[in-house]
Image: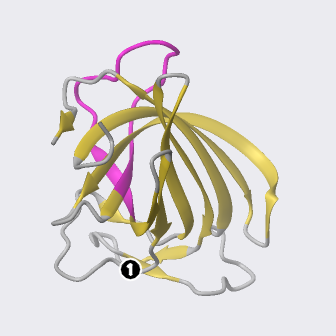
Amino acid sequence: MWKNGFVVAMAAEFSFAAYHRPISIRRKIRRWIIVSRCGPNSEFITIASAAGKVEPETEAPIGLAPVNTAVGILLSETAEDITFLMLRQQPTHFPIAGTFFPTDGYSRIFESQGRFRLRSEGRHAHRARGLDSHVRSDVPDPQPNAQRAMGWHVDAIRHNWVGEFFE
């Protein structure tokens, strides 16, 4: 079910850490994400944060909408899992929903105990380009006061959602 194109909602636990020490977890939050495998050859993954409170063992809310969207490109694919390299620049001629969110890291999709899962780790640093911009600019090595720079870990599990799609 996850080898071709799809769009699913997942309940995700985000763990945030220091940018220069991504193993040092500072806080955790739970939120919905919308994950899509797309592209002419299903070579991209998009992971978009969405508003809405996550309740254990419930369906994803109907009105989920992408807010910030990270993009990855296919790195490897086996019978057990698929790994994507997350991108710091939005691919040209690749429209996304929400605001592009530059990241360093990886995302891995797989099945575990009959559940569709995502594990993603990395870090990001960005600054808003403007008040009405839909792109954030990449900050290769954050300046000392880069408040939005952090490491992150995401563990997510698919939940039933009226908006899901499988190719």
Q: Name the residue under label 1.
A: 129
Q: Which of 1 and 165 is in front in this view?
A: 1
Q: Position of residue 32 (x, y in %)?
A: 43, 35
Question: Residue visible at 52% across and 75% down?
Answer: 126
Region in magenta: 46-71
Q: Is residue 135 left or right of residue 75?
A: left
129 shown above or below 51: below
Question: Residue visible at 67% across and 64% down?
Answer: 150
Amino acid type of the residue that numbered disc 1 sits on in the rendered structure: Arg
Question: Residue visible at 20% across and 64% down?
Answer: 39
**The N terminus lies in which quarter of the figure?**
top left
Q: Where is residue 8 in the image (x, y as percent from the top left)?
A: 30, 36
Q: In this view, does 140 lie to the left or right of 131?
A: right
Q: Position of residue 125 (x, y in %)?
A: 58, 74
Q: Position of residue 116 (x, y in %)?
A: 44, 32
What secondary structure is marked by label 1? loop
Looking at the rendering, which quadrant does residue 92 occupy?
A: bottom left
Residue placed furthest toward the top: 57
Q: In this view, does 63 lie to the left or right of 90?
A: left
Residue 62 lies in the magenta stretch: yes
Question: Residue visible at 75% across and 83% down?
Answer: 144
Residue 2 lies in the magenta stretch: no
22 shown above or below 108: below
Q: Nearer the viewer, residue 132 or 114?
A: 114
Q: Is residue 92 left or right of residue 52?
A: left
Q: Which of 41 and 57 is in front in this view?
A: 41
Q: Which of 139 and 152 is in front in this view?
A: 152
154 shown above or below 11: below
